[in-house]
Image (tube, grey):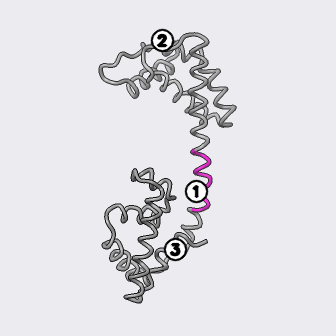
Amino acid sequence: MNVVVVSFAVEARSRYSEVGKPTMTDSALATLYLQFAPAIFAHCRRLLRSQVAARDATQEAFARMLARGPSLPEGDDALRYLYRISTNVCLNQLREQRVHERAVPALEVRAGEVKTTEGGHADREFVMALLDRCDEIGGAVAVMHYVDGMPQVEIADVLGITRRTVFNRLRKLEKIAAEMMRTSGEGGERVLRKKNAP
């Protein structure tokens, strides 16, 4: 039996098996790996167009199969199951790759921006005063939206509130900021509008 296959089986079992949960034997996994790995690898390589990524996806598919436990499908059912797992793994990798491809230009633009410290202290004081007037959820919504740049739907999911509540909290925050600017004459509006600028 191939040493690489057995070492993969041992490594995957240690990563995915839980204490007290029965696992399939190394030889059973090695047999499945020897029998189906070439087909799964070819499938992943077609989807990902990269041998390195296909190798990782193939190993991840077998590791997930191992995590399923001792009741594994056999024969053609095992191959169909591995195809389904590997397809999901590949689609997840492609999705992550697209996210990274979209993020790189935005990060390059941000890195190239010249940052000035002029007005930074006043902006920080204004934001701190503004956050002091908000409750905990309002402050979290403000930071997630204006600092982290998260969309309202994502903020709602993270905080476990409705998107409408997020919208209302942002509007309330803008009203508080406008009130503070009227009374103090500070230039805090640019802090709030910076993220929403076209």
* Tag in front: 3 or 2: 3
Q: Is residue 167 part of the magenta span, yes or no?
A: no
For the residue pair 186 and 118, the one nearer the viewer reads as 186
Which residue is disc 2 drawn over? 28
Give yes or no for contact between labels 1 and 2 (Cβ–Cβ under 8 Å): no
**Residue under the point 58% across and 31% down:** 55
What is the C-alpha distance between the residues marked 3 and 2? 58 Å
Q: Amino acid at mark 1?
A: Ala
Residue 103, numbered circle = 1
Which residue is disc 3 drawn over? 194
Which percent across, then down, holds residue 157?
45, 50
**Of pointers 1 and 3, the one earlier in the residue sequence:** 1
Left or right, 82 with reference to 146 = right
* Tag in front: 1 or 3: 3
Which percent across, then down, holds residue 179?
40, 82
- Place residue 175 in its image quadrant: bottom left
**Residue 73 sits above or below residue 53 on the image:** above
Number of dots carrying numbers: 3
Residue 86, numbered circle = none
Residue range corresponding to the magenta coloring: 96-106
Q: Amino acid at mark 3?
A: Lys
- Place residue 49 in its image quadrant: top right
SS for callout 1: helix
